[in-house]
Each structure stands twice: as structure tokens, then as C-alpha cells.
Amino acid sequence: MARKIETLYSRALTQRDMDKYFEVVNILEISHRATFNNLYDEIKNVKDTIASFSGNQVVGGLIGSRLNSGIYFVRFLGVDPRFEKNGVGTLTLNRAENFSREIDFDRIAFETHFRNVEWYQRRGYARFDEFQSLRSNDNRVILSKELV
């Protein structure tokens, strides 16, 4: 059962937010069934980490990369399962889109599992490509959206 959220906000994390990085990694680890070390290395190397909060508790987050082509590529987006269906994913995604505009990028893209495609399409994303992951043997989709 999803928990109710009283206040919800999202912001980019800074280097001083190291404890919050670990909370985002924990959420992404659960959401993506990935290993802590791989996700933490992603965060250390990428530097663009957005967290969504309910009060002081991290309830969602994402890791993004700035590609030279002007595309902001979101590598992972996750929501604490206890807070699903409360708008956390949408809030986090909206913050990523706004951040992309702030850094003058004109497109945002995601790699995701087929089961998530409809959720992104409802938010204006279109299929760009499909492939089979070599790591997990899953079918994956790349979706993108032009930011206006």
C-alpha cells in the first residue's frame, strides 16, 4: 500500500548532499535491481542527480548525463515502492525536464523497460529505438521528448 505524502518537492543534489546520494542509490537499487557499487559509481561520475523529497525523506530520484548532442539522457529513475502512485515519478521527471531546459538542452531521453513505455508516452515521450540488453537479456526501449 502506498504511503500518503504531505509535502513533495524535488531538487538537484550538490556535492554537500552526500548522505542524500546514498538514499537515492538505495531507492534506485530497489527499483532497478542493480548493485549498490554500480549505481554509486554512476552518481559519482555523472554528477547530475535529482532527488524528490517528502519532508526530509528521499522518496525518489534519478541520475542523468549531459550528452554532447544537446540531449539530457536519464540513466536511472526510481521511486521508493512505499511511495508509488503519489506523483513522485512525475515530479522527478518534471524536475529533470526543467533542469534540461535550464542547461539549454532541447531534448531529453530515457532507456527503460517495455513495461514503463506507456507511462512515459502519457507524458509526451515517443519511442526512438528498441534493443535487447546484453546485461540483463531484457527488451529495452529508448524514448525521447523535445523540450519546448
Image (tube, rainbow, N blue to C red):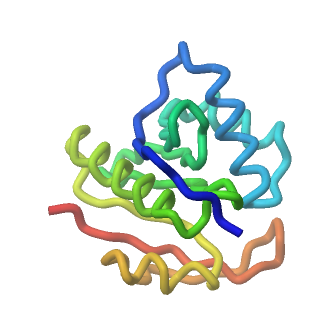
Please tell me whether residue 39 is drawn above or below residue 70 in the rendered image: above
User: How many numbered badges does the structure rendering display?
Assistant: 0
Where is residue 112, by image quadrant?
A: bottom right
Please tell me whether residue 69 is drawn above or below residue 123 in the rendered image: above
- Measured from the top left, where is residue 25 in percent x and y? 71, 40
Please tell me whether residue 44 is drawn above or below residue 96 in the rendered image: above
Between 119 and 64, the residue placed more toward the observer is: 119
Where is residue 79, by image quadrant?
A: bottom right
Where is residue 68, by image quadrant?
A: top left
- Measured from the top left, where is residue 114 in percent x and y? 62, 84
- Measured from the top left, where is residue 100 in percent x and y? 30, 47
Please tell me whether residue 24 is drawn above or below residue 21 in the rendered image: below
75 relative to 29 in the view: left or right: left
Which residue is most to the top?
Answer: 16
Residue shown at 31% from the left, 70% from the top: 145
Between 13 and 82, the residue placed more toward the observer is: 82
Residue shown at 60% from the left, 36% from the top: 57
132 relative to 13 in the view: left or right: right
- Measured from the top left, where is residue 85 in percent x and y? 55, 69
Residue shown at 56% from the left, 47% from the top: 61
Residue shown at 50% from the left, 61% from the top: 89
Which residue is most to the left?
Answer: 148
The quadrant in which the C terminus is found is: bottom left
38 relative to 70 in the view: left or right: right
The quadrant in which the N terminus is found is: bottom right
34 relative to 23 in the view: left or right: right
